[in-house]
Amino acid sequence: MRALTVRPGVKGSVAVRDVPDPVPAVGDLLVQGLAVGVCGTDREIVRGEYGWAPPGRDWLVLGHESLGRVRQAPPGSGFSAGDLVAGVVRRPDPEPCGACARGEFDMCRNGRYTERGIKEVDGYGAQMWCVEPDYAVKLEPHLERVGVLVEPTSVVAKAWEQVERVGARSWFEPHRVLVTGAGPIGLLAALLGVQRGLEVHVLDRVTEGPKPSLVRELGAIYHAKDAEEVISDVCPDVIIEATGANELVLASLTGTSPYGVVCLTGVSPVGRRMTVDAGAVNREIVLQNDAVVGSVNANLRHYGQAADALAKADVSWLESMITRRVPRERASEAFTPQPDAIKVIIEL
Ligand code: BGC
């Protein structure tokens, strides 16, 4: 079968080539790959800056944002041939830490987890793949064109759960949320905020292209002004930071109303230094009982929440987030950033 492969650590090694067909282990689902999404992590892997091959070889099947159709499902698995599914990215470490042992592998404490398409296990960028039913989520049939968004949605479902759990340490009734960045994570975070009945503001740099109208179509408010100004005008109860940009991360830390929650979801490059008034940041966080929480990855519960959120969303809005669909044999073109692109997917 054809698969999208990469040699981790080797820039420019991404290629579509023949690899052996997958052989389902007892109990596994056999799935026909329909699409994979491309995110910043995939682009880092393709640049040779991230990613690990499975033990004993130097290449990895890329793709962790998956969508497929079940071809074979063992009886009693909860899945049937024809179901639309996505696979979970992370697997627990081999000797589970306390969190992994409780199904919270997204919170792994010892870093020995593996991730499909990223860390030591083949991903979903292939014509066929296998997955354990406990690491798969079923999607509504009407999500065929957009279900590939379930993995990034699971990441924001977890981020929202973190915000709510951190907020629940005292009385918490947020009204206004600011999402920084109108990329896929920011837009999906905004969607989940709107679904919660909140007043949602989204901050990005661009004034042209599809982002401003996508935000407005959600019923949210789009801002393309200076971050400090927007933050002080909006005075959000919650900030979901989805850029990883130093200036926005820092502005967020002191940007909420009292008892605010800031959830950081952007993975930033290291080494870009800034001068910070650490005293002012500390003072504000302490005197306002603010909380800052980092959030990455997602467990099966979050995939379920994501599947529900997508099922409730407007499919044509979700489709407009997918600004480019690249055919499998030209997959290597999908990793070159393009202006105005939001979500790029590869059709398998
Ligand atoms: C994925 C996460 C993963 C993280 C770090 C992100 O792009 O969505 O599932 O944990 O990269 O590898």
Image (cartoon, rainbow, N blue to C red):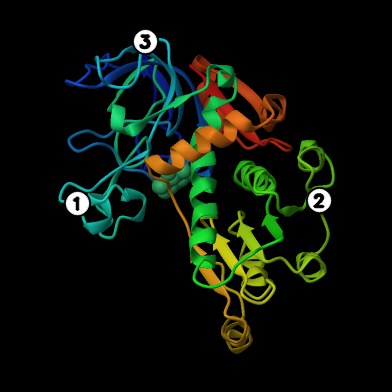
Q: Which residue is mark 3?
A: 81
Q: In x, y percent, where is residue 67?
A: 47, 24
Which percent across, then down, holds residue 80? Answer: 35, 13
Query: Is the shortest distance between ligand 1 and the CB of mark 2 under 8 Å?
Result: no
Residue depicted at 73% across the width and 53% down the height: 200
In the visual, does 40 lie left or right of 240? left
| Residue 133 located left or right of residue 209 | left
- Rendered image quadrant of residue 241: bottom right
Tell me the amino acid under the disc marked 1. Answer: Pro
The numbered mark at residue 221 is 2
Kindly indicate the quadrant of the structure image that contains residue 48.
top left
In the shown orientation, is residue 213 left or right of residue 252? right
Nearer-N-terminus badge (1/2): 1
SS class of the residue under badge 3? Answer: loop
State the mark number for residue 96: 1
Residue 321 in sight here = yes
CB within 8 Å, label 3 to label 2: no
Q: CA distance from mark 1 to mark 2?
A: 43 Å
Residue 21 pos. (x, y %) = 27, 13
Depth check: give the residue in front, 164 or 58: 164
Which quarter of the image is occupied by the N terminus? top left
Residue 306 vertical placement versus 246 (above, below): above
Residue at the spot 41% in from the left edge and 42% down from the top edge: 301
The amino acid type of the residue labelled 3 equals Ala
Q: Position of residue 266 (x, y in %)?
A: 55, 55
Which three-letter amino acid code belongs to the residue tagged 2?
Answer: Ile
